[in-house]
Amino acid sequence: MELANTAAVITGGASGLGEATARHFAANGAQVTIFDRDAERGRKVAEEIGGHFAETDVTSEESVSAAIAHAVDKMGRITACVNCAGIGTVGKTLGKEGPLPLSTFKVTVDVNLVGSFNVARLAAAEMAKNDPDEGGERGVIINTASIAAFDGQKGQVSYSASKGGIVGMTLPMARDLARDRIRVMAIAPGIFLTPMLMGLPEEARAQLAADVPNPPRLGDPSEFGRLAGFIVEMGYLNGEVIRIDGALRMR
C-alpha cells in the first residue's frame, strides 16, 4: 500500500507522535483525518496539512463511530488507522499515601488500551468494505505501545499494563483480520521529545537522553511518523511489535 494512495485516520493527531505521523503522511500524498479531543489544536494541524478533523473521545463508541463516519464522508474510505492517542500516569501499586487509586488504573487502561481497540475495531469494519489494492490489501492498523510494556519502571504499573495490552492484542488481532486482508502492527517507542517531555527542565531531558545507548539522544517524533509510513508501505509486516528506542532498556 502506497502512502500516496492512503486514506488515514490518526488518533492523537493534534500533538506529539500523532501530529508527526499526520504531517508525514500528508507530506507524502496521503489523505488524513485527525481524531483528537483538542479541537482547537486539531483543527489547526488539519488545516496546515490539508486534512480533516473530528473531535473524538476514543473511549466512547458513539464518538468514534461519528468520527469514522466523518472521515469516510471526507475521504471516501479508510485504508489506514494509526492509534497515537494516550495518557501517561504515575503511581506505585502501594505508595506513601496508600494503594494506587483504582480510578487511576482504570482510566489509563481505558484510554490507552480500550480506546485503541475501540478505534481499531470500528476502522476495521470500514476497511473491510474496501476493494483490495494491487497487493490484495484492504487496510492496515498501527497501534502505539511503549518500551514500558517490556521493561516498565517503578510507578508505571498502570501505563505498562495498558501498553502491555497493546502488545498482547497485536498478533490475535492480525489473525482475526487476516481474512479481511487487513494488517495489524504495533510500534513501541522509547523516550521521545513529545510535548510532555518538553515541559521538563533541559537538565532533566539531557539525563534522559544520556541513558539511550545509541544514538544518545531523545527520539524525534518525525522518526515515529516515518516508521509508521514504512509499515503502511511494507505489506509483509504483520502481527509484530517494532521497538524504536536507540537500544534503551529501562531499569
Image: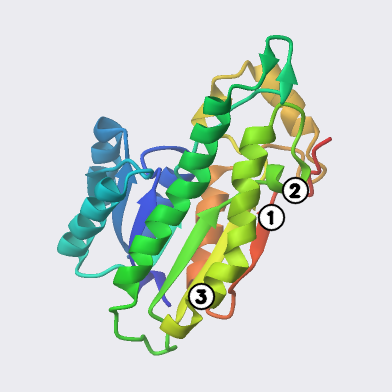
Q: Is residue 6 in sight in this rendering? A: no
Tell me, what colour scheme is on the image?
Answer: rainbow
Question: Which quadrant does the C terminus fall into?
Answer: top right
Name which quarter of the figure residue 72 lies in.
bottom left
Q: Is residue 167 above or below residue 175?
A: above
Between circles 2 and 1, the one closer to the viewer is 2
Q: From mark 3 to mark 2, how far is it between C-alphas?
A: 24 Å
Q: Which residue corresponds to mark 3?
A: 176
Q: Which residue is drawn at 67% across and 24% down?
A: 205
Expressed as whole percent of the image width and height from the top left, the position of residue 6 reads 34, 70
234 or 181, nearer to the observer: 181
Q: Is residue 244 above or below residue 229?
A: above
- 238 sits to left or right of 246: left
Q: Is mark 2 on a helix, strand or loop?
A: helix
Tell me which label, 2 or 1, sits earlier in the chain. 2
Tell me which label, 3 or 1, sits earlier in the chain. 3
Disc assigned to residue 150: 2
Disc 1 crowd rating (10 Å Cα; few below 14, some 14-19, many 20+) is some
Type of amino acid under label 3:
Asp
